[in-house]
Image: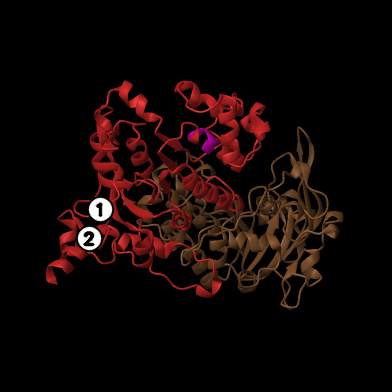
Amino acid sequence: MSSTPLLSVRDLQVQFKTLHGTVAAVNGVNFDIEKGELYGIVGESGSGKSVTALSILNILPPNGRIDSGQIRYMDSDLLTLEDHQMRAIRGNEIAMVFQDALASFDPVFTIANQIGEAVRIHRKISTSQLNDLIIQQLTSVGIPEPQVRKDQYPHQFSGGMKQRAMSAMALSNKPSLIIADEPTTSLDVTIQAQLMDLFMHLKESLGVSILLITHDMGLIAEVCDRVSVMYAGFILETADVFSLFKEPKHPYTRGLIDSIPSLDKDIDTLVSIPGRVPSPMELPTGCVFQPRCSYAEEACLLGMPKLQSLENGTTVACFRVQKGEI
Amino acid sequence: MTTRALVEVKNLKKHFTVSAQSKNPFKKDLVYAVDGVDLEIFKGETLGLVGESGCGKTTLGRCIIRLIESTSGEVHFNSQNILELSNRDMRRLRRHMQIIFQDPFSSLDPRMKVGSIISQPLNVFKNSESGTKKEVIDQLLEAVGLESGITDRFPHEFSGGQRQRIAIARSLALRPQFIIADEPVSALDVSIRAQILNLMTDLKKQFQLTYLYISHDLSTLKFISDRVAVMYLGKIVETGPVGSIFKKPAHPYTQALFEAVPVSNPTLRKKRSQLKGEPPSPISPPPGCRFHPRCSQVMDICSRTDPVQTQVTTGHSVLCHLYVNQRSSE
């Protein structure tokens, strides 16, 4: 695309200090999010997808450190900003919806109190205006009886309602980017469908960009525009969602898609990926996926392949795909 | 049906007492977690029990093997009502029924070695029939796809998928007839889920098992089940063969549930009709049909009268007024 992307992440490297030494959680991640795009990052636990999300807002836990890389948001590099400049962006221009809505709200303050705080940090607003804004936000995310609900405490909300309230909080400052880290993992499918509908609606009506972090390929297929597949701290494949599901290139992506039991087809044995996700402490030599890959050859043991673009616009990090062999 | 039911549940109820949301600290409320369930599980089949969180599916599973005592009703195992058995008789029967829990990180004792975890059931029931304990453990480990050399290691040394394999080995130690698998793969990574599901289907053939597979995940449920029971707010609203239910779900709730599952094919995206609202609290379930406040095809009768089981096709029955009317008008 010709326009400059809203967010652009380049060569992001994140390390964690642990008792057993330094661990590389994210190893050189690159992606761009355009305006009004719903971008998905999919991966299993330990793939570095959440760490990538936290890095964008610079809210890594104390033992995590961004080693190198660039995170450009509009005209500024977020990693070089002063603390007060970063605070002006956090929750204002880039907002976050966390996985566990229960743990993300403070149990001793009312919902209105907490949404109000998020607004007041960023701008001056009169109490009555703030009140109107909160009611309007709660209405827009589909919470019934916002007048009553706003003065309730988080424990009086159900899981789905809490997640909606958190979306209302994230939206209260009209951000241009929302990062949603596994927002529906703790919800039932029917509630998940409601929340995803809300996200799609926000994207279309307000033009916000959304970065959706998930492990659920089905969810990706349902809502995303473009997708990156992460594994052990690397992006293995980036593609638009239609190409990704129609012609998955990387053997890992193929495995992921094949291992979802389908509701339409009858099968006797599920395709499974042998082995398990490597611990970041002991990454395999060569390509990170090589020990579980049925296409691995000698070259795969020697080095991690770089992401390269293919003809259809997909970028993939696999020697054999790049050579056109698979 | 010609096959005999291994487990037969009749009008099973489990009501929990909780402190009421009121100023009076002594006031109690009843949670109608399981409220009149009839269910049959036939020998050699896998019955998939699906429902959203809070619908009572886990409670039902635990009541069936008497991990929690039911309020009323009957559970027949091999034609014997196990709810009437004394603790001693019940204990004798327990070797035939086992359970695999959802979270392999909390279901294995962190201070026990793998070998003792798996042999624990053998110690409890001493009259194990074949071979020495070590042989039995090795056989079990081989059956679940683990190396025999791991018996001296601790659970924390294993990944989630491997731990679930250990838990499965433990559940097989006494050669049970019936295994309840309560969300066995939901704590696992996507690429590992398929491994465990394949293992479970292999073991079923190898050990002639009968499963009750409890899950909220329709896609894994469809893969593993022969028959499906759909639960909503303490009641089974639909049961039938997996093909029939997935092809033509009868109950409006089942239809909505299927509709909500994301399809892993972006070309099939569609605007879907959605369930409004959330499941009501099981403390005060709505009168009549429990689904009527959220149902898109609600009728006058739904809020007044409890629906009764109606058969739509052979072996496929549904708890909904829509089908009662259809039958009488035919």
Q: Quadrant of residue A314?
A: bottom right
Residue in the picture at 51% in, 56% down = A167
Instruction: List the residue tagged with mark 2.
Output: B311
What residue span does the magenta drawing correspond to? B167-171
Q: Residues within 10 Å of mark 2 (few under 14, many from 20)?
A: some
| In this view, A320 is above or below B204 | below
User: Residue B290 has which mark?
Assistant: 1
Q: Is residue B194 left or right of residue A320?
A: left
Q: Of A167 and B15, which appears nearest the observer?
A: B15
Outermost residue to the front: B130
Tell me, by letter, which chain the rendering colours red: B
Mark closer to the observer (2, 1): 2
Q: What amino acid is found at the position of numbered circle 2 in the picture?
A: Gln
Q: Helix, strand or loop at disc 1?
A: loop
Residue A88 in magenta stretch: no
Chain A pictured colour: brown
Q: Of A275 and A40, which appears nearest the observer?
A: A275
Quadrant housing the C terminus of chain B: bottom left
Kindly report the distance in space between the C-alpha atoms of the residues bearing marks 2 and 1.
Answer: 19 Å
Magenta stretch, main secondary structure class:
helix
| In this view, B246 is above or below B178 | below
Percent position of residue A99, x then y: 55, 49
Q: What amino acid is found at the position of numbered circle 1 in the picture?
A: Arg
Percent position of residue A188, x then y: 44, 53
Q: Residues within 10 Å of mark 1 (few under 14, many from 20)?
A: many
Residue B170 in magenta stretch: yes
Query: Which colour style is shown?
Result: by chain
